[in-house]
Amino acid sequence: MDYNAVFPFITSFLSLLFFFSVLEQYFRKHKLQQLMWAIAMLLFFVTAGFEALAVALQSWNPIIYKIYYVLAAVQVTFMGVGVLYLFGTRDIINGNNSHKALFIFSLIWFFFSLIFLSRSMVFLLILIPSTVFLLSSTLIFFLPTVNPIREWWKRYLTGINFAHLFLGFSLYITLIMTYFAIVTPVNLSILSHGSEVSGLGWQQSDLGTGRALVRLFSPLHTVPGGIALIGGGFYSYYAWQRSIKKQLSHYEWKTGIFNLYIAVGALILGQGAFFSGFGLGTLYISEVISVFFMYFGFLESDRISKDKIVSLFRITHIIKPQMV
């Protein structure tokens, strides 16, 4: 028995629970970060469901595989942008430091689009705007504290607007990636097996050849999204402990530890997807461990009771009739 085949079913179940939990929180608090995480967990459920379907049917449908690959990359973007909206809401990212955040992420987009330019000129569509982001954020570093441009930047590129920009540019990359996912043929001999394929389904020959063009768009999502998610989790825990230290003169290591659960879960997912891209078959088990850690961290952060989790599946609890 291939025990690895069981993992997508477990992941889809846990991610569905996670989705309903975050959705319930969104209906209570109406925060953008909760909406982004709800979308991310819905995508997680869909992609894990596609994996479970492939296992059950012992083959991948080419159309489903193409949708699966794009959504699997985009879900990381929504996880990361959820953290950015949270940081914008809490003023961790604001008009005073948003140029630093833009510099970091635009450098990632710039780097990957530049090195992939040798494969296809289409990456100019990403390289040009990322260069503009990089140069403009660098300019703010060197401007005097009192300057009309800096003041304009503070007013308009707030933390929330930066998260808007991150999300908008990521969706722009998604549109380009989706086009190439549609027009790029898949390897039917690989998809004929219902096993874990990750990005290998695009390869028309052995792994020694260059990666299929559509696969090059994946790190443009997963790397910046992963940095936002993993870095945000570790930074939140560090900031929490620093604040406690100032107030109490000692650390409370258990306080805010849910941030570490989320960060570690995201880190496990990232390494699993990375090694799976080389055919090592680590994705399915890493997804189970990842969603477990992140979901546990979420429950710890929100203190959702057992009874409330059960009530999440009652549609009438979420969607209340409107008074006329």
Image: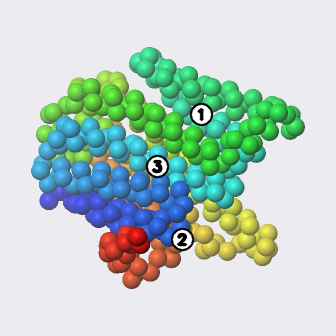
Residue 74 at what x, y percent from top left? 41, 44
Q: Nearer the viewer, mark 3 or mark 1?
A: 3
Question: The residue under label 2 is which amino acid type?
Answer: Ser
Badge 3 marks a residue whose secondary structure is helix
Query: Where in the figure is residue 259, as x and y percent of width and height?
Result: 56, 63
- For this rendering, which residue is in front, 168 or 5? 168
Please give the name of the residue rendered at 37% of the width and 75% of the height, measured from the top-left corner.
Answer: 317
Question: Relative to residue 30, is residue 178 drawn left or right?
Answer: left
Residue 111 in picture, x, y percent from top left: 55, 28
According to the picture, the residue beneath numbered tag 2 turns out to be 301
**Residue that appears at 53% across and 49% down:** 81
Q: Residues within 10 Å of mark 1 (few under 14, many from 20)?
A: many
Residue placed at 18% from the left, 56% from the top? 2
**Are the two marked residues, 3 and 1, in contact with CB atoms closer than 8 angstroms?**
no
Circle 1 residue: 106
Mark 1: secondary structure: helix
In the picture of the structure, the residue carrying the numbered disc 3 is 78
Q: Earlier in the sequence, mark 3 or mark 1?
A: 3
